[in-house]
Amino acid sequence: LDKAVALAERLSPALKGNMPNSKVNLANGVTGHHGWAPNVAIIAEVGSLQLEMAYLSKISNQPKWNEYGERVIKFLEGHKPQHPGLYPTMITANGKYTQAHVSFGALGDSLYEY
């Protein structure tokens, strides 16, 4: 548990704002995005983080992790896609979907699974 919380602390620079950054350097906290997806969050990463942070809050008794996950989900709920419930795979921090591609496989699966 201590290592999970320590890892979450080191990941936390990527968890600021409405959407997570896709990458974080664990040594210095510098965050960024994939070169092939600049300035967007991948919807599968967003969905996966929400579940993981909620569980970490539960087992660590630290509500801040769940608060992050809930903040992201509420943000998504406030930025409905064109087809309700079918989220395109990439979204900016201001809630703009950068393309219309929806996937239950790569880039989208974790949002729907969790």
Image: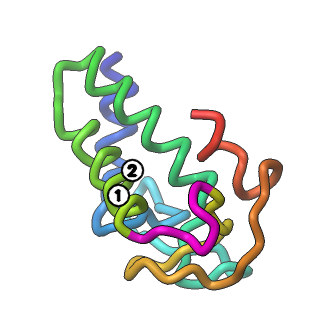
At label 1, which amino acid type do we have? Leu
| Contact check, label 1 and label 2, Cβ < 8 Å | yes
Which secondary structure, mark 2? helix
Out of 58 and 112, give the one closest to the viewer. Answer: 112
| Disc 1 crowd, CA 10 A, few/some/many (<14, 14-19, 20+) | many
Q: Position of residue 111 (x, y in %)?
A: 60, 46
Where is residue 4 shown, x and y percent of the image? 39, 27
Q: Relative to 35, is 96 on the left or the right?
A: left
Q: Nearer the viewer, residue 111 or 16?
A: 111
- At a point 41% along the width and 66% down the height, the residue shown is 19
Drawn side of residue 94 relative to residue 38, left or right: left
Task: Using the image, determine if residue 28 lies above or below residue 63.
Answer: below
The mark closer to the camera, 1 or 2, is 1
Quadrant for the C terminus, please: top right
Q: CA distance from mark 1 to mark 2?
A: 7 Å
Write down the residue under mark 2: 11
User: Which residue in the protein does label 1 denote?
Assistant: 15
Determine whether 73 is above or below 19 in the image. above
Dot 1 lies on which element?
helix
Magenta extent: 79-85
- Place of residue 75 in the rendered image (x, y in percent of width and height, measured from the top left): 34, 63
Q: Amino acid at mark 2?
A: Leu
Image quadrant occupied by the N terminus: top left
Q: Is residue 11 above or below residue 87?
A: above
Residue at 45% across, 33% down: 52
